[in-house]
Image (cartoon, rainbow, N blue to C red):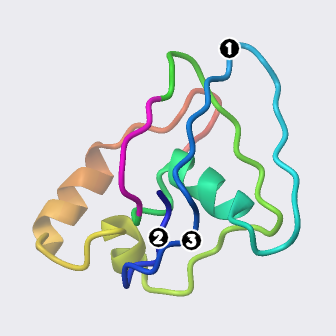
């Protein structure tokens, strides 16, 4: 069940299964939770009750609008947490990250 960070319910419970390799599309009126569901599946929306599992492989999430957080880089790296990591741990984590093949740092 999707909800706001304050706990207001945004959707009724959903149960679905999509076979691996299948294409699917969500459609419906504005404000019905389509983008919020996809944000949840991609890990960008932490406010939900229940569980979900993505199978092996990759999933592609194409939002309606680019997702550019309006916050500091520190807050973006910690999202959805709001604290609990010191700057030394953040520097260590960012310096140990290796770029994807074909990208240079």
Q: Is residue 6 above or below residue 31?
A: below
Give the percent coordinates (x, y) of residue 97.
35, 43
Choose between 14 and 30: the one closer to the eye.
14
Q: Nearer the viewer, mark 1 or mark 3?
A: 3
The residue beneath circle 1 is 19
Q: CA distance from mark 1 to mark 3?
A: 26 Å
Q: Residues within 10 Å of mark 3 (few under 14, many from 20)?
A: some
Q: CA distance from mark 2 to mark 1?
A: 26 Å
Choose between 42 and 31: the one closer to the eye.
31
Give the percent coordinates (x, y) of residue 26.
81, 46
Residue 76: quarter of image: bottom left
Image side of residue 47 versus residue 35, left or right: left
* 13 in magenta: no
Image side of residue 55 versus residue 47, left or right: right
Is there CB contact under 8 Å for labels 3 and 2? Answer: yes
Q: Residues within 10 Å of mark 1 (few under 14, many from 20)?
A: few
Residue drawn 45% across the image and 80% down it = 8
Residue 74: quarter of image: bottom left
First in sequence: mark 2 vs mark 1: 2
The residue beneath circle 3 is 10
Residue drawn 57% across the image and 17% down it = 57
Is there CB contact under 8 Å for labels 2 and 1? Answer: no
* 52 in magenta: yes
Q: The magenta stretch spans which residues?
A: 48-53
């Amino acid at each position: 069940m999707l909800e706001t960070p304050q706990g207001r319910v945004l959707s009724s419970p959903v149960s679905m299964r999509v076979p691996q390799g299948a294409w699917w599309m969500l459609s419906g009126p504005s404000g019905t939770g389509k983008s919020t569901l996809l944000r949840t599946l991609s890990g960008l929306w932490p406010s939900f009750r229940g569980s979900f599992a993505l199978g092996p492989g990759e999933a592609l999430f194409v939002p309606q609008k680019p997702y550019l957080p309006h916050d500091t880089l520190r807050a973006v790296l910690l999202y959805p947490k709001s604290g609990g990591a010191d700057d030394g741990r953040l520097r260590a984590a960012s310096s140990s990250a290796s770029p994807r093949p074909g990208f240079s740092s």
